């Protein structure tokens, strides 16, 4: 099990509550639908050539001719993705999984243009494979197929090569926050995405500052030693007074019992007489949680999320976007090759989850992939 030190709470006389993210965070509201707004953002890059070319250049594609060719493929993939998405929206959920998957596949290819433009227009396998089985949900597996789109997309997204070789559909559903309640009442809920808080704490009498991090389900997070230990090396567990938690995070006494709080072991000197080193405290928290860090793309009162690895034995990175992608691939196979099997499954309680997934999770995928492609984390809500 991970080892963490229990420390003594330092008195806080000032603080800055912050939403964490490795990219620029842009809160927005819209009078239209959220998905239409997100497609409009993507089309700014795919339809305005100078903007799209600039995006490719910022991602390291400096050769003008290569960038020009890459942009044409990037543009085509975004256009195809939007067409599939809009078509999927008007289909019954039993059939729409196929078109949602093709939308996701094209967005994955568009993302790959930012890293490897030589893939544009090439015929590449899906990178995933699935065989129909008359198994219950907990035994449904999707397998990795090497040198395919998914393998390359995973590496682009997480910045490391994939080590996982198979994925259990029921396990992946536990990453999908849109259907957390449905998963709970269907008995399929395991804690995988954990809400978390962050603030830069300050002691003005000593001109020092440190990070303050709080999250739910410490016992569950402790299981993932390889991934969580870097955080425990830099942070110590503390007991924060209730009055402080109410002031900083609006947390009640009841909620406090469910949370665990940690402070940086080291106090950081200010950059000047009145300039706390906020950037360092932010970076320390995000970098130490790198393997499990996930941006909170919603207007919830959480500053980020922990996305726990796929399994204790195989602690490869996994989050909501990648989980949604794999599940939608699985559904596309049922729609294409065995619709009768799908109809039979949808009559069972556990596969009621699947129908809920198709209704609610595609928008979250569009939220997350739009932010990753553009390099701006959009927190988009209705006006």
Image: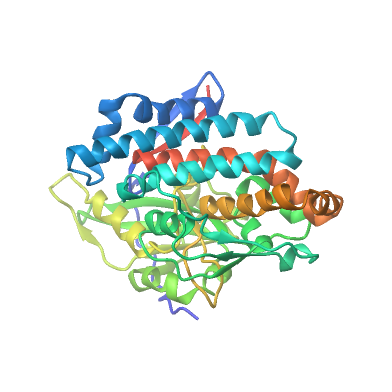
Vertical position of residue 39 compared to residue 348: above or below? above
Vertical position of residue 311 compared to residue 177: above or below? below
Q: Is residue 181 visible?
A: no
Q: Position of residue 231 (x, y in %)?
A: 38, 68
Q: Is residue 273 visible?
A: yes
Give the residue furthest to the left. Answer: 272
Q: Nearer the viewer, residue 26 or 331?
A: 331
Seen at 50% across and 22% down, the residue is 30
As drawn, is 98 to the left or to the right of 60? right
Vertical position of residue 46 compared to residue 241: above or below? above
Numbered label tally: 0
**Quadrant position of residue 170:** bottom right
Colouring style: rainbow
Seen at 33% across and 69% down, the residue is 234
Vertical position of residue 110 compared to residue 174: above or below? above
Q: Position of residue 308 (x, y in %)?
A: 52, 64
Seen at 55% across and 67% down, the residue is 310
Q: Position of residue 51 (x, y in %)?
A: 28, 28
As drawn, is 125 to the left or to the right of 289? right
Q: Position of residue 212 (x, y in %)?
A: 38, 57
Q: Nearer the viewer, residue 53 or 168?
A: 53
As drawn, is 122 to the left or to the right of 326? left
């Amino acid at each position: 099990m991970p080892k963490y030190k229990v420390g003594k709470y330092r008195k806080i006389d000032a603080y800055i509550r912050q939403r964490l993210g490795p990219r620029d965070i842009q809160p927005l509201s819209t009078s239209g639908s959220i998905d239409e707004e997100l497609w409009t953002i993507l089309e700014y890059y795919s339809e305005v050539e100078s903007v799209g070319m600039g995006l490719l250049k910022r991602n390291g594609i400096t050769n003008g001719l290569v960038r020009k060719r890459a942009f044409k493929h990037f543009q085509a993939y975004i256009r195809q993705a939007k067409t599939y998405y809009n078509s999927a929206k008007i289909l019954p959920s039993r059939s729409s999984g196929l078109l949602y998957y093709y939308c996701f596949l094209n967005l994955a290819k568009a993302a790959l243009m930012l890293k490897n433009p030589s893939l544009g227009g090439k015929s590449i396998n899906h990178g995933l494979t699935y065989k129909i089985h008359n198994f219950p949900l907990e035994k449904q597996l999707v397998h990795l197929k090497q040198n395919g789109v998914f393998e390359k997309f995973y590496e682009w997204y997480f910045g490391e090569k994939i080590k996982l070789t198979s994925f259990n559909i029921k396990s992946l559903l536990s990453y999908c926050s849109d259907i957390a309640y449905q998963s709970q009442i269907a008995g399929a809920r395991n804690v995988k995405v954990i809400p978390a808080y962050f603030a830069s704490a300050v002691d003005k009498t000593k001109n020092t500052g440190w990070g303050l991090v709080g999250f739910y389900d410490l016992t569950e997070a402790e299981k993932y030693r390889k991934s969580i230990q870097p955080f425990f090396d830099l942070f110590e567990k503390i007991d924060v007074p209730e009055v402080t938690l109410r002031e900083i995070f609006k947390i009640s006494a009841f909620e406090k019992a469910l949370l665990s709080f940690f402070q940086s072991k080291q106090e950081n000197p200010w950059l000047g007489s009145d300039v706390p080193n906020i950037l360092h405290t932010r970076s320390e928290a995000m970098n130490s949680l790198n393997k499990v860090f996930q941006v909170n793309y919603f207007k919830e009162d959480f500053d980020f999320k922990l996305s726990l690895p796929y399994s204790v034995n195989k602690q490869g990175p996994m989050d909501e976007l990648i989980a949604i992608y794999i599940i939608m691939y699985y559904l596309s196979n049922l729609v294409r090759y065995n619709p009768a099997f799908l109809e039979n499954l949808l009559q069972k309680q556990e596969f009621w989850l699947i129908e809920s997934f198709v209704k609610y999770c595609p928008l979250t995928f569009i939220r997350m992939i739009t932010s990753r492609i553009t390099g701006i984390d959009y927190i988009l809500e209705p006006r």
